[in-house]
Amino acid sequence: MTASDPITFDSVSPNPTSHNTSAHTPITPRAASQHTLTPGQVAAMFNVNPKTVARWASSGILGAIRTPGGHRRFREADVVALLNRKVED
């Protein structure tokens, strides 16, 4: 890829410094079209610290996607499913 090549979703790889990439998938056009939430938004829903949400993603409790900039985003459907599981427990 050269400097003049356009950046596409296919040319963006997940953050190479991530410790546990199995819980994270790179952002795709399909994932981008879904409503996603930031760690802060998810934390507010569960009344926890955003760092806790990041730990959930690292441990596989909550799946995350990575933006081209390496930030985590969470699919709203996944968050609602986890929230419903927490309510049932």
Image: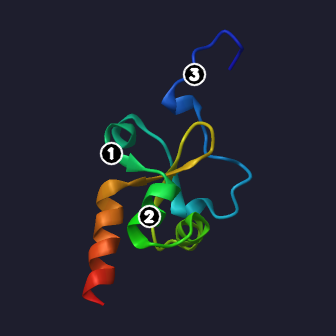
Q: CA distance from mark 3 to mark 1?
A: 22 Å
Residue 59 place in picture, x, y as percent: 56, 74
> On the image, numbered disc 3 is attached to which residue?
7
- Mark 1, secondary structure of its residue: loop
Disc number placed over residue 60 in the picture, else none? none
**Which residue is the site of mark 2?**
44
Q: Position of residue 12 (x, y in %)?
A: 59, 34
Q: Residue at x 57, y 72 (%)?
A: 52
Residue 86 location (% of width, % of height): 33, 82
Above/below status of 36 relative to 49 = above
Amino acid on which the number 1 mark rests in the picture: His
Amino acid type shown at disc 2:
Ala
Q: CA distance from mark 2 to mark 1?
A: 17 Å
**On the image, which quarter does residue 3 sit in?**
top right
Residue 63: x and y in percent read 45, 62
| Helix, strand or loop at mark 2 | helix
Q: Residue furthest bottom?
A: 89
Query: In the picture, residue 32 is in which quadrant?
Result: top left
Residue at 51 percent of width and 57 percent of height = 40
Q: For residue 35, which numbered disc appears in the image? A: 1
Report helix, strand or loop for mark 3: loop
Tell which circle, 3 or 1, labels the residue nearer the N-terminal end: 3
Task: Locate the C terminus by quadrant.
Answer: bottom left
Quick check: marks 3 and 1 in contact, CB under 8 Å? Answer: no
Confirm or deny contact between disc 3 and disc 2 (CB under 8 A): no
**CA distance separating discs 3 and 2:** 33 Å
How crowded is the residue under tag 1: few (<14 C-alpha within 10 Å), some, or many (20+)?
Answer: few
Q: Amino acid at mark 3?
A: Ile
